[in-house]
Image: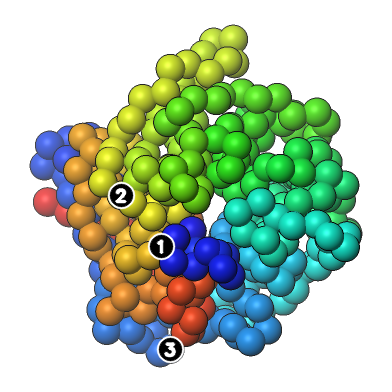
Amino acid sequence: MNTSARATRTSLLAAAAATLLAVTVAGPATAAPTAGARFVAHLDMAAGQRPENIALEPSGAADVTFAFSRQVARITPDGRVHVLATLPEPPAGATTPALSSPFLGGIVRAHDGTLYFLYATGSADQTGLWRLRPGGTPRRIAALPAESLPNGLAYDERAGRFYIADSVLGTVWRVPAAGGAPTRWATAPELAPEGFLGANGIKIHGGAAWVSNLDKGTVLRIPITAHGTAGPVRVRATGLVNIDDFAFTGHGDILLAAINADNEIAVVRPDGSHTVVLSGADGLQNPTSVAVRGNTAYVASGAYNTNSDPNILAARVRPGA
């Protein structure tokens, strides 16, 4: 989320030394941007279709949360949008921390097709982790404090735990797979905001929780100990102000980061250095999140600040000599 969009959203050398990442055209484009990527879908901004987070289906479809329209939707490979669920309106007088409007954040998909996502309204009756089984209706399975802003969501399906990045309280929450009471798994100054939003995106990778901090422009690594507790927080990258969510490419600790306000996707390497590989010239409109399957990266753009053409882009990620 970016600072200039506060009013409405208010808004990856490699493990082997010779390995680099290249981003190339992912395939034929129906409406090609200038370079490096293709559009999967152009979304309807007037209908509130501003994608905040993205999870991929085996079919090639993408499941997304629309941040402020309270909707979870599926976008097919040919760009069609199917609304799967609409979350309840917040009660009168409820105000979402930092954002004011009700907010749908991170989304993940379990192997059985169940979707899990985060909803924040400023109400203790609604804020928390929600579940949507195929063909079912949404149901909250874990309550979070009304004063929290659950934003990034990661699912360690093997261990049976969810991890939630709270952008306002500077906390990583942990929730059992079946739902229930959340635990404050990690709290540290490195997770806290500096004026707007702190801990934002989160992924479980290599025995640790990796977290981005939007205000501080950092990527953090928090080891998961043998007892399941949080190890010491370590800063792995800096200088990424307005970093939103991110995804690992499958090449060691290399990741792709969405730099929201600057309309950029940066490759962040294990040594913390980073390079911009996609920009507004490729069609990015305040990118919010990235998902990677095989050699393809999918980028969601919410257009929170540009107010033009929220979309889903695809780009090919491949190791090069």
Q: Is residue 128 above or below residue 30?
A: above
Report if residue 312 is visible in the image: no
Calculate the distance from the C-alpha at mark 2 to the C-alpha at mark 1: 10 Å
Mark 1 or mark 3: whose residue is earlier in sequence: 3
Question: For the point 48% across and 34% down, which residue is it?
Answer: 191
Q: Nearer the viewer, residue 45 or 298?
A: 45
Mark 2 or mark 3, whichever is nearer to me = 2
Which residue is under mark 2? Answer: 240
Q: Is residue 100 left or right of residue 132?
A: left
In the rendered structure, which amino acid carries the disc numbered 1?
A: Asn
Q: Disc 2, disc 3: CB below 8 Å?
A: no
Q: Callout 2: helix, strand or loop? A: loop
Q: Callout 3: helix, strand or loop? A: loop
Which residue is under mark 3? Answer: 30
Residue 92 picture location, percent across and down: 88, 63
Q: Is residue 307 above or below residue 191?
A: below
Calculate the distance from the C-alpha at mark 1 to the C-alpha at mark 3: 25 Å
Question: For the point 70% across and 24% down, which residue is it?
Answer: 183
Mark 2 or mark 1: whose residue is earlier in sequence: 2
Question: For the point 81% across and 67% down, which residue is it?
Answer: 86
Q: Nearer the viewer, residue 210 or 37?
A: 210
In the rendered structure, which amino acid carries the disc numbered 2?
A: Leu
Residue 185 picture location, percent across and down: 61, 23
Report if residue 285 is visible in the image: yes
Q: Callout 1: helix, strand or loop? A: loop
Question: For the point 49% across and 81% down, which residue is it?
Answer: 307
Q: Is residue 157 left or right of residue 41?
A: right
Q: Say which mark, if any, is on residue 260.
A: 1
